[in-house]
Image (cartoon, helix red, strand yellow):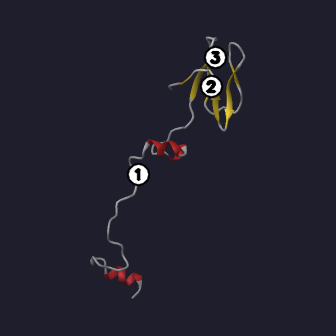
């Protein structure tokens, strides 16, 4: 008997050898992923699509000007007031210089 014939004859049978009739729970919850799992995913593969990049306000100690920096800038960013280095590019992310406080900007 072929598979198609067996499927046709076994549609109402519970013990068909070729059809898998038991439900198994998923090993992970697709509707409620963990925050760690969402953070590791690409921005287009999140449950709700959103960009991974953001703007950061960086301030140089002793200087009162706050400079807004994009989180994935590919070049060195200088302070607007004293022209010293604020951020260095580090593998696709901008890393603030040592001793420079920074704050993620809200949109």
Measured Cα–Cα span from mark 3 to mark 1: 43 Å
> Label 1: how many residues lie within 10 Å, few (<14), some (14-19) or many (20+)?
few
Compared across the picture, whether 86 is left or right of 44 comes to right
Q: Earlier in the sequence, mark 2 or mark 3?
A: 3
Image height check: is 70 above or below 40?
A: above
Compared across the picture, whether 82 is left or right of 6 comes to right
> Is the N terminus in the top left, top right, bottom left or bottom right quadrant?
bottom left
Quarter of image, res 88: top right
Nearer to us of marks 3 and 1 is: 3
Instruction: Determine the residue positioned at 68% across, 18% down.
Output: 79
> Label 2: how many residues lie within 10 Å, few (<14), some (14-19) or many (20+)?
many
Quarter of image, res 99: top right
Compared across the picture, whether 99 is left or right of 76 comes to left
Q: Which mark is residue 77?
A: none
Give the image location of residue 33, x and y in percent.
Answer: 42, 47
Instruction: Determine the residue positioned at 38% across, 79% down.
Output: 18
Residue on which disc 3 sits: 60
Q: Earlier in the sequence, mark 1 or mark 2?
A: 1
Quarter of image, res 95: top right
Image height check: is 80 above or below 75?
A: above
| Dot 3: element | loop
Residue on which disc 1 sits: 30
Residue that lies at the very extreme toward the bottom in this rendered image: 1
Residue on which disc 2 sits: 69
Give the image location of residue 52, x and y in percent.
Answer: 55, 37
Measured Cα–Cα span from mark 2 to mark 3: 13 Å
| Dot 1: element | loop
Mark 1 vs 2: CB contact within 8 A: no
Q: Earlier in the sequence, mark 3 or mark 1?
A: 1
Measured Cα–Cα span from mark 1 to mark 2: 35 Å
Mark 3 vs 1: CB contact within 8 A: no
Front-lying residue, 94 or 12: 94
């Amino acid at each position: 008997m072929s598979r198609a014939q067996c499927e046709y004859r076994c549609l109402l049978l519970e013990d068909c050898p070729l059809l898998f009739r038991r439900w198994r729970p998923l090993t992970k919850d697709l509707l409620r992923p963990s925050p760690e799992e969402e953070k590791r995913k690409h921005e287009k593969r999140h449950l709700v699509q959103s960009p991974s990049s953001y703007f950061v306000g960086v301030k140089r100690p002793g200087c009162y000007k706050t400079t807004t920096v994009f989180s994935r800038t590919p070049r060195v960013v200088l302070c607007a007031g004293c022209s010293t280095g604020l951020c260095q590019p580090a593998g696709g992310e901008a890393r603030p210089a040592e001793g420079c406080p920074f704050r993620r900007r809200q949109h």
